[in-house]
Amino acid sequence: MGNNLNFEDTDTILTEDRLFPPPSDVVENANITAYMRSKGFNDYESFYQWSLENRFEFWEDMAKELHWFEPWTKTFEWTEKPFFKWFTGSKFNIVYNCLDRHLESETRHKVAFYWEGDDGSNRTLTYEQLYVLTNRMAKALQNLGIQKGDRVAIYMPAIPEQVAALLAVARLGAVHTVIFGGFAANALRERINDAGAKVVITADGNYRGGKHIQLKKITDEALEETPTVEKVLVVRRLDSEINMQEGRDFYLDELFKEIPEDTVVPCEPMDSEDLLYILYTSGSTGKPKGVVHVQAGYAVGTYTTTKFVFDMKPEDVYWCSADIGWVTGHSYIVYGPLMNGATSVLFEGTPSYPAPDRWWSIIEKFKVSIFYSSPTGIRGLMRFGEEWPAKHDLSSLRVLGSVGEPINPEAWMWYRRNIGRDELPIMDTWWQTETGAILISPTVILPLKPGSASRPFPTIEADIVDKNGKAVGENKGGFLIVRHPWPSQMRTIYRDPARYQTYWDTIPDVYFAGDAATKDQDGYFRVQGRVDDVIKVSGHRLGSMEIESSLVSHPAVAEAAAIGKPDEVKGEHVKVFVILKDGHEASDEMEKTLKLHVRTNVGPLAVPDELEFVPSLPKTRSGKIMRRVIRARELGEPVGDTSTLDA
Ligand code: WTA
């Protein structure tokens, strides 16, 4: 995996020694404390050690809290390594656990989502209303020909119909693939084609940060070369004029005229290992990979982590500010919270529109008690000053969270001080699209260290090793690995199992996460960043290759290399180095043209902040561009092993 495996051990000097112990009443009332006590433990250390030796008992306990049409016969099977299975022999549907089950209790009338649009409009949906919407959408999809196992692409803004779309697809036993609304037509097309989607669900458009995004127009462009797509379901968000192709495109509200409110489409009873979704993410090389998650194990993992990491209680109002187009939205906007019967906020807009207190005003308005956000979001709003959060009553908050990239201690402290009134715990959660759910994170009972994701979740055996798999010891840099599969782990890469295997054979027999990290004397992890060619721009995961191939598709470009550079707000930004073909001149005009080209090809999130024209690029003798060398030179760092460099 990647060509940067020559990661050299870097002794990290730990300058961060502040420790924030949890308040005793928080510990006393925590969900995790109740479970620990039921197992006879009073401290996390001995409980965690027990969980490593009794991982199946732990996950069985959790699975028993969910609804199964038929119980599992085997908890775990690992006969064909590295492929594994959880909860086999069962019949299960995650959507039954998100919706149907709650209709039998008071949760039926509880708010599932408070929605706020970019334009300030609001909608509120109870569990019952979300159930009705989901069933009608499932019926509409059925009428369009969707059956168990079919793939459905979802390219939508953050509106309640987006949540219902995922649930409707999964209810039918079909497989969703959500594509982030910030991707351009080419990126959308590539994902639709890889998944072989039969139906696309989109919207006529939406507003983001006050700007009109023409989702349907982008969809139409993508659909010019998508042989598997038969129908398009369009949700009206703006009532804007769009092109509707006769026989292919259908408005949801028009189909609803024929689908009464009391329509019920029963949940398809699925095998535990049947596909739930494919989510495309960037790897170190090549095309985006379709990470595959399955019904039962994924449900158990996201249910459990939501309950313990965020300490989710029935009276909480929870808000995860991520987008459903990324894994954080799948696990911690849709599935985890709904299985827990939570009341959530869903927000369509951006943090600083119309003003830099948009997030804080939403927390005040809906009395949010658990807020799960990102380092980029926090750093971006820090710039505007403390006066913006100070204008709002944030006293409803009790737990904060962070995900997507390392949170630097300065941003951590600002978050705690200004949003958490100097007392709230911050759950810095480390995980990945591939892991499906949080793997390293505090729970509310752990003492916290700024900038550290703290300790592995129960049963998770994480470590820091060198390239031979040998543990490096305390406070030494190395590769972050995990030793045993957990229920919500990806099962394969869609249509590319060989690519999946590289995760387990880069360092033999352990899961290789692709991150560099350290572990201190207290077992606290500090994740430093990727060791491959994945770039994290504002927490969004991009591959160098995607940006490079988009650049070389421009007629003026001969070769290109993309790297991530440290960025105060975004964590990293993209810098590209471009070799022009003969007959093309380097100029400001050319720079603008190429940036626009990336924007229209991959999407706004991939546009490089810096572009440099160069006469040559360092390469290996076999002709591969050495991004590691380019990056080291750019940042003035030691270049490392260059024995394969074609000097
Ligand atoms: C990074 C996002 C440090 C890491 C859920 C990982 C983090 C990649 C953290 C996965 C964190 C995520 N601290 N780094 N708390 N959380 N990362 O697939 O590099 O979009 O490998 O999943 O994000 O990104 P992905």
Image: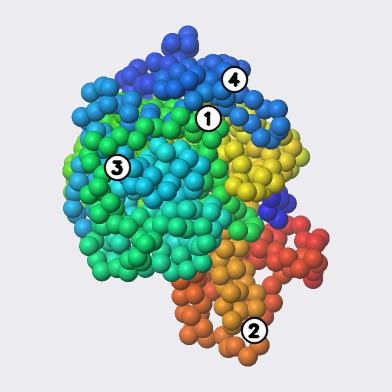
- Residue linked to disc 1: 271
Mark before the other along the chain sequence, 1 or 4: 4
Q: Which quadrant of the view contains residue 78?
A: top right
Q: CA distance from mark 2 to mark 3?
A: 54 Å
- Position of residue 625 relative to residue 271, above or below, is below
User: On the image, numbered disc 4 is attached to which residue?
Assistant: 74
The amino acid sitting under disc 2 is Lys
Q: Compared with residue 183, is residue 123 higher up or lower down, i.e. above or below?
A: above
Mark sitting earlier along the chain (4/3) = 4
Position of residue 466 measured from the top left corner of the image (x, y, whole percent)? 72, 41
Q: Nearer the viewer, mark 4 or mark 3?
A: 3
Q: Say which residue label 2 marks.
A: 581
Q: Earlier in the sequence, mark 1 or mark 3?
A: 3
Q: Estimate how packed mark 2 is, as few (under 14), some (14 to 19) or many (20 or more) residues with alpha carbons within 10 Å.
A: few
Q: CA distance from mark 2 to mark 1?
A: 54 Å
Query: To which residue does mark 3 refer?
Result: 136
Disc 4 from disc 3: Cα separation: 35 Å
The amino acid marked with disc number 4 is Lys
